[in-house]
Amino acid sequence: MLLATATEEIGHVEVLATAVAMNLEGAKSEQVDDVVTNPAVAARMGALEPRHFLSAGLGAMPSDANGVPFNAACVDRGGNLIADMRANVAAEAIGRTLATRLRELTDDPGMKDMLDFLIARDTMHQQQWLAVLEELGPEQAMNAPGDYENTGEHAKHAYAFFNHLMDAPLPTDARWTSGPSLDGKGEFSLLEPPPALGQEPELQPAPPEVHAGAVYTAPNGVASAFGRFTRGVVDKVKPGA
């Protein structure tokens, strides 16, 4: 299933790259004002994508919506089945949303037809990843990875919602602040304000060659400027500070 869907997605890249090339073929920069009617898009578009000419010689390019070529960094792989299926659902949901937005920006029948096809396929792909999670049974509601249990002193934090909005109380009866957790291993709770955890770090100041200033510099020249900076940030964000 994974290989079949990956093959299809490579085909989608080819379809989209070809559509972009065909739309830009022969287009002049002054045409932007005529084709872009959405004010938000018009404000962003100063001219047509220069990479289409500079990098591809007006040919089709496997690139994202900003003209950045795809590479291995686009592969989202966590190595855990539950995590990967959830990531796939999210990716398809975002992709389907983008396709519907693109459809709103065109009145070309061919583009609408292509986007309707891609929207339909993104529907199936969302559903198939959700179906895999359902097929896993009770494991679908488990945390990834499912073979590690919360133990020790921090186990009490596993199902507690920390409300960091000190002046905005949250509902105590929301599904995510009360009742059994979805994995059946705990009870949701709400902590307002959240507890101040950990200790203030005592890191060494910077060595003279960093030129961090007298306040941040160690007389013996051994230490880290980042230590003092981090301590200042911690003082500003920790609860009750």
Image (tube, rainbow, N blue to C red):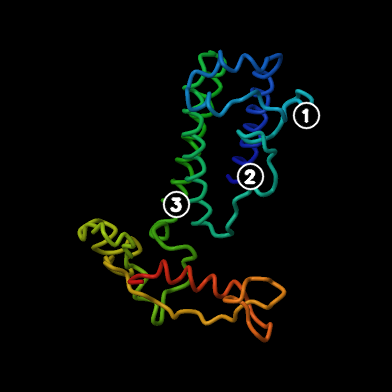
Q: Distance between the Cα atoms at labels 1 and 3?
A: 44 Å
Of tags 1 and 3, the one toward the viewer is: 1
Q: Which residue is mark 1?
A: 54
Please tell me whether mark 1 sits on a helix, a strand or a loop: helix
Task: Give percent across and percent down for residue 82.
Answer: 49, 57
* First along the sequence among labels 1 and 3: 1
- Name the kind of residue labelled 3 in the image: Leu
Task: Give percent across and percent down for residue 52.
Answer: 72, 27
- Name the kind of residue labelled 1 in the image: Leu
Q: Where is 29 relative to 170, above or below?
A: above
Q: Quadrant of the N terminus?
A: top right
* First along the sequence among labels 1 and 2: 2
Q: Distance between the Cα atoms at labels 1 and 2?
A: 33 Å
Q: Is residue 54 left or right of residue 11?
A: right
Q: Residue at x 69, y 82 (%)?
A: 221
* First along the sequence among labels 3 and 2: 2
Please tell me whether mark 2 sits on a helix, a strand or a loop: helix
Q: Which residue is mark 3?
A: 133
Please tell me whether mark 3 sits on a helix, a strand or a loop: helix
